[in-house]
Amino acid sequence: IFYFLPIFLAMTCAKAFKCNQIIAMAIGATLVYPAIDTLIQNTEVVSTIFGLPIMKGEWQIGEATKIFSCTESVIPIILAVIVMSYLEKGLKKIIPEVLQIILVPGLELLIMLPLTLVVLGPIGIYVGNGIQFVYDGLMGFSTILGGALIGGLWCVCVIFGAHRALLPIGLNDVAVNGHQNLLAFAGAANFSQGGAAFGVMLRTKKKALKQVAASAGIAATLVGVTEPAIYGCNLRLKKPMIFAVICGAIGGAIMGAGNVYGDAFANNGVLTIFTYAAFGMTKFFFYLAGIAVAFFGSAILTYFFGLQEEDIVEE
């Protein structure tokens, strides 16, 4: 399924950037079209599109040789859709509305296909490799430190939406290497937010806050959706958020110590814990230990120290 990843990403990115999803998916489909991919991977001949040279290349990763390819890639189609969104807005400004339904999609394809294959695709591949290199360097230096940083700061990034910039690392890791640890460490953050929310639920006597905390805790721990826990109770009560960050960092460090990996790119919650059982029971036990420390640690700290008196007693 990762072979067709550019098509799926094209649809979601086009929706996010409010541009033509069908044209975006057509560009993504072009990147994975076997004839195009074969052309790109044939490094022995020079290939062109509309007279423009298509960049090709290969590089060494350890003992393996990787050949330039946009299949299973992440960054190239994201860059293409971003550029296309601005192109579409520009075309709609200069083309009369009565002609837009015909000319805008056609011109988008005519411009974006060669631009993606010649410029944006290669740039995206190298940007993806650069991001992966930095992330792998951090993990190579210390998986414990890397796990602690991601486990602690992931939900801080969620507050600003910055976590979306990190997701391509995990996607790229699964596509290239068949495994990822980014969302394992992020799972410590998810469970710590859920634990803090449950701590609030158990401690407070306020019915409204108790209901919000209960539903937010379930969402965070069951399916890894942390926004209700962050915005609904933890961030506004302050101390639960602080405890969640601390316990998430500790949980991530434990996972890093066990060199935890998952074989799929899946949001972390109870429903997806077996994603991290694919590489042996030892790594799986470290994953379970990490989420347990994150969850119960933040719940206990929040219960005893996380709420002010006015947050506990019903008014």
Image (tube, rainbow, N blue to C red):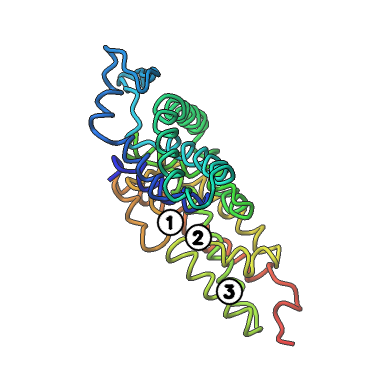
**Left or right: residue 275 compared with residue 234:** left
Helix, strand or loop at label 2? It is: helix
**Which quarter shows the C terminus?**
bottom right
Label 2: few (<14), some or many (≥20) within 10 Å? Answer: many
Give the image quarter of residue 201: bottom right
Q: Percent from the top left, x then y, of residue 312?
A: 70, 79
The answer to whether residue 112 of the structure is visible from this angle is yes
Viewer-proximal residue among 103 and 52: 103
Helix, strand or loop at label 1? It is: loop
Q: Going 42% across and 24% down the picture, which residue do you hit?
A: 118
Q: Going 58% across and 55% down the picture, which residue do you hit?
A: 247
Q: Percent from the top left, x then y, of residue 67?
A: 32, 22
Q: What residue would you read off at disc 3?
A: 213
Q: What residue would you read off at disc 1?
A: 268
Disc 3 and disc 1: Cα gap in Å?
19 Å
**Left or right: residue 195 compared with residue 243:** left
Q: Earlier in the sequence, mark 2 or mark 1?
A: 2
For badge 2, the amino acid type reads Phe
Label 3: few (<14), some or many (≥20) within 10 Å? Answer: many
The disc at residue 176 is: none
Q: Going 45% across and 48% down the picture, which residue do you hit?
A: 183
**Left or right: residue 204 compared with residue 50:** right
For badge 3, the amino acid type reads Ala
Q: Percent from the top left, x then y, of residue 257?
A: 46, 41
Whether label 2 touches label 1, CB < 8 Å? yes
Q: Earlier in the sequence, mark 3 or mark 1?
A: 3
Helix, strand or loop at label 3? It is: helix
Q: Nearer the viewer, mark 2 or mark 3?
A: 3
For badge 1, the amino acid type reads Asn
The answer to whether residue 148 of the structure is visible from this angle is no
Q: What residue would you read off at disc 2?
A: 191
